[in-house]
Image (tube, rainbow, N blue to C red):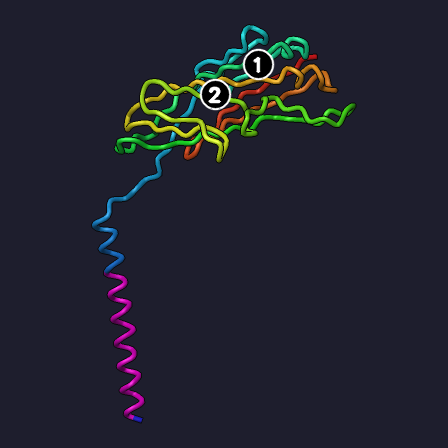
Amino acid sequence: MRRYVSILAILAVIVISVLLVAAWSFIGSLLHSPSQQPTMFDVSATRVDDGGHGSISVAPDGRSGSINGSKATLAGENEVVISLTVRQSPASGQSGVSFVLTVDAPSYVQQSTGWTQNLVLPDAHGCPDIVYFQSGSGSGANTTQPCGYAGSVPSGGNASLTMRIAINGAFFSNMDVTTSQWPLVIHTSSGNDLLVTWYVSG
């Protein structure tokens, strides 16, 4: 019986020792490792241009924009240019922090033909045909996995990013409805979404 109690006592001491070492290591890591806050990006639109076809507006906060017009008017679009500002919010203190932009573009199936019409034409990789150009702070390039853009912004800096979007005019001329709205969503990794909506008035 005494031998059994001694074995239990030894096991208890071992378990308590292991727990104390683990707890001390955890506390030490908190004391000596600086806390890392996730870097957030603030993305806003400063300008939307479709070459003078539709009526365009951009919200004061830059989080959304709209293009309004009839089917015939919007069918004349072949390129829409969206100018963006990308900044760290808050500044992380790192020399360069990466972000990724991706786009969800609308599509529909034409009832009379069964064909799918996409607002944005595809490029050679099957991605939406969007050419990105970054100026000012940072740099980046188009990506195909995922389809979009990967860029970087230095701490405290702002990047100007231009999106040149190839528009499928048949998207508007072939639609079966006369009044509708079609949102294009720009997603930012660790940041806000931005919405540009086409409003078809007839």
Quadrant for residue 121, please give it. Answer: top right
Task: Determine which of the numbered discs, if any, sits on residue 131 in the image.
Answer: 2
Task: Look at the picture and state if 15 lies above or below 48.
Answer: below
Q: Residue at x 47, y 19 (%)?
A: 163
Q: Residue at x 51, y 11 (%)?
A: 49
**Is the C terminus in the top left, top right, bottom left or bottom right quadrant?**
top right
Q: Earlier in the sequence, mark 2 or mark 1?
A: 1
- Residue 6, horizontal then vertical, whole percent: 27, 87
Cα distance, mark 2 to mark 1? 20 Å
Tell me which secondary structure the magenta stretch mostly adopts. helix
- Residue 145, horizontal then vertical, whole percent: 48, 35
Task: Determine which of the numbered discs, if any, sits on residue 47 in the image.
Answer: none
Q: Nearer the viewer, residue 141 or 103?
A: 141
User: Is 18 contained in the magenta span?
Assistant: yes
147 horizontally vs 2: left or right: right
The magenta-colored residue range is: 2-24
Q: Residues within 10 Å of mark 2 (few under 14, many from 20)?
A: some
Q: Residue at x 29, y 85 (%)?
A: 7
102 horizontally vs 89: left or right: right
Q: Nearer the viewer, residue 69 or 13?
A: 69
118 horizontally vs 124: left or right: right
User: Is 103 contained in the magenta span?
Assistant: no
Secondary structure beneath label 2: strand
**Is the N terminus in the top left, top right, bottom left or bottom right quadrant?**
bottom left
Q: Disc 1 marks which amino acid?
A: Ile
The residue lying furthest to the right in this view is 112
Q: Nearer the viewer, residue 195 or 126?
A: 126
- Residue 157, horizontal then vertical, whole percent: 30, 23
- Residue 19, horizontal then vertical, whole percent: 28, 67
Task: Determine which of the numbered discs, if any, sits on residue 67 in the image.
Answer: 1
Secondary structure beneath label 1: strand
